[in-house]
Amino acid sequence: MKLNKQSPFRQAALLLAVLICALPLLFSCGDGSVDHVNGQNKRGQFSSDFPPPLTSGPPFTLPFTISRNFVQLTDGTTVYINVDMIEGEYYDKNSPGYAPGDGIYDTNYNGKYQISVYTAIDQPKAVFTMPVTFERGKLNFDKQFQLVFDDYNGDGSPDFTIGQWGSGKGNVYQIYTVTPNAEIKQLPCDTLSTTSFDYSVQLKKASSNSFSCEAYDEKTNKTVIRTYNWQNDRFVLQLP
């Protein structure tokens, strides 16, 4: 039987058609699922339609400034005060192993922090640093924030609060002061909790050297007003 010979052009066209039909099969190896960690398909293809990586927060390098502020000292000079993470990590609700809980947020900047003082906005090195420590160990913030300044003990120097999660009813706080020589000191204070979840709060001044705040009383299950007076170099909770 005589076979019909095909021209080289026809043979090339047929080969090209076979290759085009086979392309989907060539790239269909694997289960075709998405690698969420790397944000790419396991088949080796990239697509803007793929879900984002699990850890989807902004990249950051240490030290990472969670709070950037400036304030005037008693002599009128301006100093710049940062709250910096010096050791730690960022993770969010999409991160591998994420588990919600007390003081855990959708976004978390968790680690060791310090307060840094600069005398110029472009100064490369702080003139003073002080670690921030709470009983819980590492500090955790879900976003950047601003410090709120006031004079709570009547010495003329600016004071500020830093808070952390205390309970489902509000944060616990520490009070710090900026001394005339641009140093930071923690002001001793009886346990200070409020109904606020802000990381720095404005305390209501009751007098030149005392303040009050709204807090949740676990014994009575009620919201109460607590007053603190500056006595013997510490803020003392006044008994009702």
Image (cartoon, helix red, strand yellow):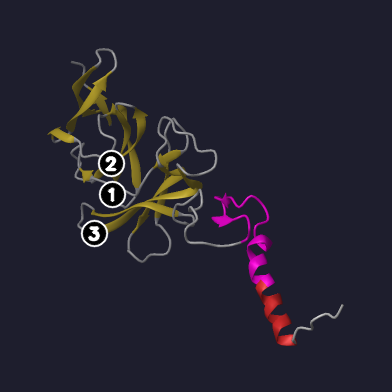
Magenta range: 18-44
Read off the residue under disc 1: 146
Q: Is residue 68 above or below residue 3?
A: above
Q: Which residue is nearer to you in this view: 95 or 25?
A: 25
Residue neighbourhood size for the residue with mark 1, other residues' Cα within 10 Å, grouped as few (<14), some (14–19), many (≥20): some
Relative to 216, 140 lies left or right: right
Eye-nearest disc, 1 or 3: 1
- The kind of residue on which mark 3 rests is Thr
Q: Position of residue 167 (x, y in %)?
A: 35, 26
In the rendered image, the residue lying farthest to the top is 220
**For residue 27: magenta?**
yes
- The kind of residue on which mark 2 rests is Ser
Residue in view at x 34 percent, y 46 percent: 184
Read off the residue under disc 3: 77
Q: Position of residue 30 (x, y in %)?
A: 67, 52
In the rendered image, the residue lying farthest to the right is 1
Q: Which residue is nearer to you in this view: 136 or 6?
A: 6
Q: CA distance from mark 2 to mark 1?
A: 7 Å
Eye-nearest disc, 2 or 3: 2
Q: Are marks 2 and 1 in contact (CB under 8 Å)?
A: yes
Q: CA distance from mark 2 to mark 3?
A: 23 Å
Residue 200 image label:
2
Q: Is residue 77 above or below residue 153?
A: below
Residue in view at x 62 percent, y 55 percent: 42
Residue in view at x 20 percent, y 21 percent: 223
Q: Position of residue 163 (x, y in %)?
A: 33, 37
Q: Position of residue 47 (x, y in %)?
A: 51, 62
- Rendered-image quadrant of the C terminus: top left
